[in-house]
Image (spheres, grey):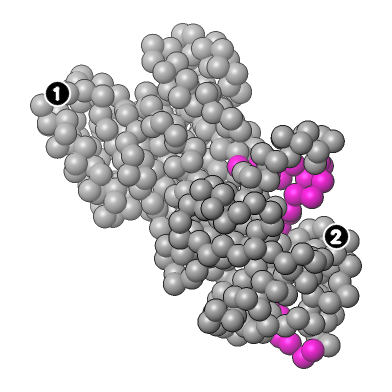
Amino acid sequence: MIPTLGEEGAAQLQKQMAERVIAKAKALAGVRPVSIQVVYEGDSEALMRSWLGDGLLLRPQVQDDLGARMAAGFLDAFGSGAKSVVTIGTDCPGLTADHLADAFDALLSHDVVIGPATDGGYYLIGLTKPRPQLFAEVPWGSEHVQARTLSLATSAGLSVGLLEPLTDVDRPEDLHAWERENRISVIVPAFNEAHGIAAALERVACHENVELIVVDGGSSDATPEIAASFNASVVHSPKGRAIQMNAGANHATGSVLLFLHADTLLPDGWPALVHAALDVPCTAGGAFELRLDGSFRGARLIERLTNFRSSRLQLPYGDQALFVRTEVFRKLGGFPDLAIMEDFAFVRRLREFGTVRIVPRPALTSARRWMTKGVWRTTLTHQLIITAYYVGVPPRAIARLFGRG
């Protein structure tokens, strides 16, 4: 990587990948009784601790080839009392806490579990007891590592479980995988939002590896021009929030999609909050808590009720900045083409894929609906809309009835 990124750039990449992998392991440790051991080379334990923080077991790495170092790591972990051990590298950007959970689950019925890399190696290997023979006479760094390891396991009469293949980052041409797996595509459906969209886009455009897509539904004001000034990709679409959001998703290249209303401001540090939420095992998607930008009477009560509903029922609405992994969004088929309640219907289906996690940081959204029509009238209208949807009134009829067409 040094010829492409330079020494400092390559070191920074390695640091970022290590931090990301450890974050995923910590996410698993938050829901399962697992310990995390980091085997390091060079530096001191104090320096490693100051970098990675507490809650980790730190062990210096033996000075030998990769196979000997891995075998020694397994021996040390099992010697400490572990019943099953999974070893991972730091160069696989697609690795998630769910992959780690799947590996431990596979070890309940297999002697060995392997996470195949697309280049012929592997990004993960797990064992139920030390197996030093699996790390001897393996052509490390070649495309034959995985095949050789499977051959050694078969010869030893061991049962092997395989996880899904993933791409690791070994060469400059692999960097696109790292960029994509960390990229968040923010999709903003807009229609005549020139008066306020700049504030929302500014919170997005200031972050690296974030793709900004504004889907314009035929604005007659300067909305598209303002979006372009923030280097957003401007997509033109027929008007309709579900139609526009799906159009934006079709143009997205990130591994995560975040759907942002043009009058909503994301909190500081939002990309890290999104990644951290999605790293928790069994998480299908999420959203932020709600905060209104007005101080009118009843505003705080609305916020408390909304956030209670979101967290307890896992039913956030679109103005809370819904986010989801792109692969899950594709499996769901996107937002249903409804005239109203598209976010509600989408989240109800999303819950079938796992937990809808609410980030305990608020997205600040415009209170103009409540300010224009009044707090109680707006709240009552929302509840009537939900009730009508639940009892089976067609969404188009609801939209006409409540003036949302």
The magenta span reads 156-182
Residue 94 visible: no
Give whichever of discs 1 and 2 has the lower sequence position: 2
In terms of depth relative to the viewer, which is nearer, 130 or 394?
130
Residue 133 vs 19, above or below: the answer is below
Instruction: Name the residue that disc number 1 marks.
Output: 296
**167 left or right, relative to 286:** right
| 1 vs 2, front mark | 2
The image position of residue 329, as x and y in percent, is: 54, 48
What's the residue at 56%, 74% (across, down)?
Answer: 104
**356 left or right, relative to 175:** left
Residue 331 vs 106, above or below: the answer is above
Q: Which mark is residue 141?
A: 2
In terms of depth relative to the viewer, which is nearer, 337 or 170?
170
Between the residue at mark 1 and the residue at mark 2, the CA separation in whole angstroms equals 63 Å
The image position of residue 312, as x and y in percent, is: 26, 55
Helix, strand or loop at label 1? It is loop
For disc 1, the neighbor class at 10 Å (few under 14, some 14 to 19, many from 20) is few
Quarter of the picture containing the C terminus is: top left
The image position of residue 106, as x and y in percent, is: 60, 77
For disc 2, the neighbor class at 10 Å (few under 14, some 14 to 19, many from 20) is few
The image position of residue 327, as x and y in percent, is: 59, 51
